[in-house]
Image (cartoon, rainbow, N blue to C red):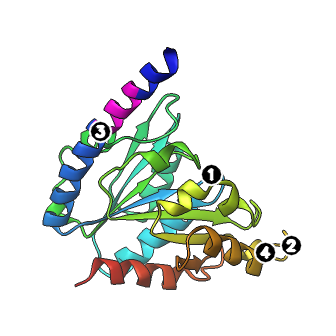
Amino acid sequence: MIEPRILAVRTKILKKNDELARRMRAEFVASGVLVTNLVSSPGTGKTALLLETMKLLIDRGRRVAAIVGDLETDNDARRLAESGAPVRQIMTHGCCHLEADMVRDHLDGWDLGQLDYLFIENVGNLVCPTSWDLGESLRVALLSVTEGEDKPLKYPGLFNTSDVAVITKIDLSRACEFDRGLALKNIEAVRPGMVVLETSAKTGGGVTEWTDFLEQKKGP
């Protein structure tokens, strides 16, 4: 008897989240801001890549901001603030994902019409964030070469709910004996036709191409 009750409560919570996310998405689109939700496991290099991305976009004259989710500490927010962009931290205190109302509450005081890009760095987790719509227009699945080529097969939900995959830390490919061809094959098996970009925040490799992709999605 317990399992059906848990399922019913979860369905109700997700429905409420999705309704709020749809309203937020409409507001984001009307304001002209591209909202991007970055999802990966801890240690994939989300923060490092996002920092370089924000710096490059700012150099191009774009107006950017970020919201960062972590269980504890504001370390990543302080690191991203080095870009010069406004950054806000959400500490979930044990919750393994961000929810739409958390993001909405941290938008207070920001004029969305004055932003071109809003990045949401989700809590490091490959499972829970896939079920929670945050009102984003673009969801990005990040995979580090240090994690192994079979991540897409082990966590297909993430790749099936994402719009683009970004392979990070490609500068470590040789040291990790990363099989690029196999990784691409596995992504293709889970999500045929998925756009895959390859980056290194340390060397800058692929970061321009990744940023160009964002600019294309943003439009004029």
Which amino acid does the dot numbered 2 rest on?
Glu
Vertical comparison of 220 with 16: above or below: below
Q: Which residue is mark 3?
A: 15
Secondary structure at numbered mark 4: loop
Secondary structure at numbered mark 2: loop
Q: Quadrant of residue 157?
A: bottom right
User: In screen coordinates, is 110 left or right of 194?
Assistant: left
Residue at x 61%, y 76% (from the top left corner): 199
Q: Nearer the viewer, mark 4 or mark 3?
A: 3
Which amino acid does the dot numbered 4 rest on?
Ser
Q: Which mark is residue 177?
A: 2
The residues bearing labels 4 and 2 have C-alpha atoms spaced at a distance of: 6 Å
Q: Which mark is residue 173?
A: 4
Residue at x 51%, y 45% (from the top left corner): 123
**Quick check: is 144 in the magenta stretch?**
no
Q: Quadrant of residue 40?
A: bottom right
Which amino acid does the dot numbered 1 rest on?
Ser
Q: Nearer the viewer, mark 2 or mark 3?
A: 3
Please state the extent of the stretch shown in magenta in the rendering: 8-15
Secondary structure at numbered mark 3: helix
Q: Earlier in the sequence, mark 2 or mark 1?
A: 1
Q: Earlier in the sequence, mark 1 or mark 4?
A: 1
From the viewer's side, name the closer residue of 103 and 5: 5
User: Is residue 200 visible in the rendered structure shown here?
Assistant: no
Q: Position of residue 208 (x, y in %)?
A: 50, 84
Q: Which mark is residue 41?
A: 1
